Image (spheres, rainbow, N blue to C red):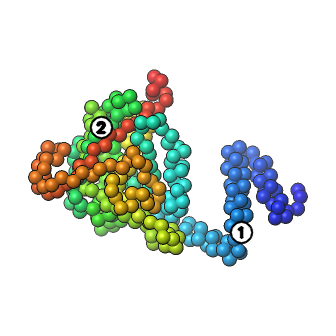
Amino acid sequence: MPYVTEKTLTDIVRERWTNIPDARLRQVMTALVKHVHAFVREIEPTQAEWATAIDFLTRTGQMCDDKRQEFILLSDVLGVSMLVDAINHRRQSGATPSTVEGPFHVADAPPMSNGANMAVNAPGIPCFVVGKVSGLKGEPVAGATLDLWQTDGDGLYEAQRPDIEGPWMRGLYRAQDDGAYLIRTVAPIAYTIPMDGTIGELMNRTDMSHMRPAHIHFALSAPGYHGLVTHLFQSGDKWINDDAVYGVKEPLIVDFKKLPAGSKAPSGEIMNEPFCVVHYDFVLERKAQAAAA
Ligand code: BEZ
Ligand code: FE
């Protein structure tokens, strides 16, 4: 092995990682060495700056537990979560696009009948979400599961309301035989990503937005189809072009149409207060084996 110099160091390190037996780890680590060395060569950190970076990453890790994941938040604000999502969900044109899952999904949402209200006693403007789940050829996906979670009208998720026992602002719906679904909830509002940790420290040193535009999260699944984790975003939201985690895709922006008290809701009832209606048809892509069968 040649002795290292500033010039030869990167090649020497890469060379050593090139000889490990695990092919995927070899590919990952040689690329990591290549790009981290290029990054360091580009920014030329002082020793003090490098120590600050190590301290930042150390404190980011120390903030993580089973409820809080500051490293995922770092990946989110760097756009890496969206990039990994895009790479893993390349779908045919016409299929509803995916977006980040985020940290607030809770498993085992309560099952809801078609049209049931998943926001009983929650603050916010009543909101109906109505549409169909179909495949790329237009076939209805009967029985598709729609797992929803969102903030209430105060901008808080279940995890941010420790005072409330039991499920809050989430529900498991099923598409009917014709693929149709009807959800009753309240309209979400824009909210900030958690700012009380190291990512907040970082964002506060910038003038970048730390807001997420108002959205409802959906995870759709059906046998024979690729699952879909996505959001519906409210058109016209102040932060629609500045999502802190880069989750907004044009086909996911929808109108939350406001209707006055006395209007008929999609459930058939006459509402005694103003409410919103969102129409959205989800399109799922069949898995290759299912399509071929
Ligand atoms: C969310 O949508 O809930 C979310 C996603 C990424 C970071 C923070 C929040
Ligand atoms: Fe969210």
- Disc 2 is placed on an element classified as strand
- Disc 1 is placed on an element classified as loop
Q: Which residue is mark 1?
A: 44
For this view, does 238 lie left or right of residue 177? right
Q: Residue visible at 42% across and 52% down? A: 248
Question: Relative to 125, does residue 94 appear above or below in the rendering?
Answer: above
Residue 38 visible? yes
Q: Residue furthest right?
A: 2
The image quadrant that residue 241 belongs to is bottom left
Question: Relative to 198, does residue 27 appear above or below in the rendering?
Answer: above
Q: Residue visible at 43% across and 32% down? A: 286
Disc 2 crowd rating (10 Å Cα; few below 14, some 14-19, many 20+) is many
* Numbered marks: total: 2
Seen from the viewer's position, the closer of residues 16 and 95 is 95
Give the Cα distance between marks 1 and 2: 54 Å
Q: Residue visible at 31% across and 61% down? A: 189
Residue 198 visible? no
Image position, residue 219 (x, y; %):
38, 46
- Say what amino acid the circle numbered 1 marks: Glu
Image position, residue 236 (x, y; %):
33, 56
Mark number, residue 132: 2
Residues at discs 1 and 2 in contact (Cβ within 8 Å): no
The image quadrant that residue 140 belongs to is top left
Q: Residue visible at 56% across and 66% down? A: 61
Seen from the viewer's position, the closer of residues 5 and 55 is 5
Q: Residue furthest top?
A: 293
Cβ of mark 2 under 8 A from ligand 2: no
Image position, residue 288 (x, y; %):
49, 29
For this view, does 110 lie left or right of residue 77? left
Mark number, residue 86: none
Image position, residue 183 (x, y; %):
25, 46
Circle nearer the viewer, 1 or 2: 1
